Image (tube, rainbow, N blue to C red):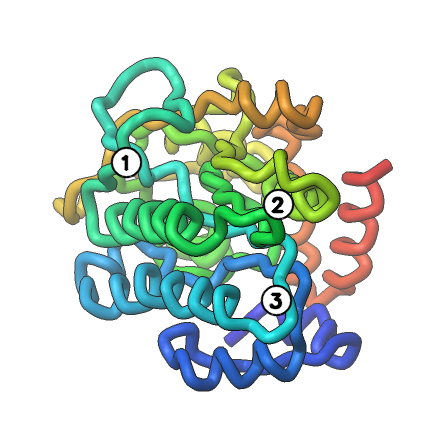
């Protein structure tokens, strides 16, 4: 708490089952009841620093959670037609290159979170080769997304939520690694891409594959630059302090090459990073004044798909 799912009041508009991705028996029970044709796998322990504190929990969730989901796809009584497993841009063996990683680069994330997501990719590859290669097999893709920002993210140890918490509590904005470069994008960008891939491979299985989903090169910025944009967009003369807390290893430079997604689907990001920050700040300021965040989201979604 708080969480966007409850805040957006979408639970009353769907059949929602809250469960643990590590519980295979329950997951199978839900699969057999719902008999899904399309599966989007976004369940994860997604925080790098948490993965250092709780590595076993992270691997159980991100690796065995993927195994459990694909087991349900494999044994489902009604055939699943389309599966998208969402991983991360951090799955790659990071050599701190200045160019973007492509989908055929080696996988080997450094920290437990990144590595567990690399393992999730490998599990998916193995299941595709071992069980889903027949004529009527489900089309399965993985999507390797960059860092997302947007309203409604309340997670700890993420730069924009940390900034918003600092502002709301009249605290100093502290940046741990201001010179680290990351591919930042508004959350609606990858979500739209996941749905696009799921739909395309549902209709034509040849679209199944492995896709990077990230911004253009110009929107790969340092954390310090991102926080500068946040402070400018928020107003009130905000500033930040560079204070490394000596925490665990985090990559300094990471970019994605999204040529495959662009070439295959004619896809391009709608927003640059500055626009993404603007949309995020708009939502957060509406939330801070107890305004109608659902109306803001509805309008932002409508504008995204104009």
For mark 1, give the secondary structure. loop
Q: Is residue 115 shown left or right of residue 22? A: left
Name of the residue lying farthest toward the front:
135
Task: Find residue 275 and name its label.
Answer: none
Crowdedness of circle 2 by 10 Å Cα count: few (<14), some, many (20+)?
Answer: many
Q: Looking at this view, is 124 or 103 the one in front?
A: 124
Q: Is residue 281 visible?
A: no
Q: Nearer the viewer, mark 2 or mark 3?
A: 2
Q: Is residue 104 above or below residue 32?
A: above
Circle 2 residue: 194
Q: Is residue 21 above or below residue 81?
A: below
Label 3 packing within 10 angstroms: few (<14), some (14-19), many (20+) = some
Q: Nearest the camera: 178 or 213? A: 213
Which residue is situated farthest in the right direction here? 306
Q: In the picture provided, is 116 more to the left or to the right than 299?
A: left
Q: Which mark is residue 107?
A: 1
Would you say the residues marked 2 and 3 are in contact, meaning their CB atoms lie under 8 Å apart?
A: no
Q: Residue visible at 54% across and 81% down?
A: 18
3D distance between C-alphas at marks 3 and 1: 32 Å
Q: Earlier in the sequence, mark 2 or mark 1?
A: 1
Q: Image quadrant of residue 90?
A: top left
Q: Which mark is residue 4?
A: 3
Q: Position of residue 143 (x, y in %)?
A: 50, 42
Give residue 11's position: percent from left, percent from top: 70, 77
Q: Position of residue 254 (x, y in %)?
A: 34, 27
Q: How many marks?
A: 3
Q: Nearer the viewer, residue 41 or 300?
A: 41
* Image quarter in which the C terminus is found: top right
Write the residue at 70% across / 29% down.
270
């Amino acid at each position: 708490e708080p969480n966007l799912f409850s805040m957006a009041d979408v639970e009353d508009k769907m059949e929602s089952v809250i469960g643990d991705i590590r519980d295979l028996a329950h997951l199978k029970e839900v699969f057999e009841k719902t008999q899904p044709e399309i599966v989007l796998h976004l369940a994860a322990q997604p925080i790098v620093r948490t993965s250092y504190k709780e590595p076993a929990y992270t691997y159980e969730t991100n690796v065995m959670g993927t195994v459990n989901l694909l087991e349900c796809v494999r044994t489902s009584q009604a055939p699943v037609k389309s599966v998208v497993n969402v991983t991360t841009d951090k799955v790659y063996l990071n050599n701190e290159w200045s160019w973007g990683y492509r989908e055929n680069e080696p996988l080997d994330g450094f920290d437990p979170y990144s590595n567990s997501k690399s393992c999730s990719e490998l599990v998916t590859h193995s299941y595709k080769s071992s069980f889903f290669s027949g004529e009527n097999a489900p089309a399965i893709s993985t999507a390797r997304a960059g860092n997302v920002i947007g309203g409604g993210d309340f997670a700890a140890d993420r730069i924009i939520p940390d900034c918003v918490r600092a502002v709301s509590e009249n605290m100093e904005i502290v940046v741990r690694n201001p010179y680290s470069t990351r591919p930042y994008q508004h959350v609606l960008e990858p979500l739209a891409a996941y749905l696009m891939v799921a739909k395309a491979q549902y209709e034509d299985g040849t679209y199944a594959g492995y896709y990077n989903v990230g911004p253009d090169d110009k929107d790969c910025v340092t954390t310090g630059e991102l926080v500068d944009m946040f402070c400018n967009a928020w107003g009130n003369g905000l500033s930040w302090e560079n204070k490394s807390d000596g925490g665990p290893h985090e990559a300094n430079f990471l970019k994605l090459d999204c040529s495959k997604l662009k070439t295959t689907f004619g896809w391009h990001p709608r927003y640059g990073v500055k626009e993404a920050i603007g949309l995020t700040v708009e939502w957060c300021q509406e939330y801070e004044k107890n305004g109608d965040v659902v109306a803001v989201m509805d309008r932002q979604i409508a504008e995204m798909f104009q």
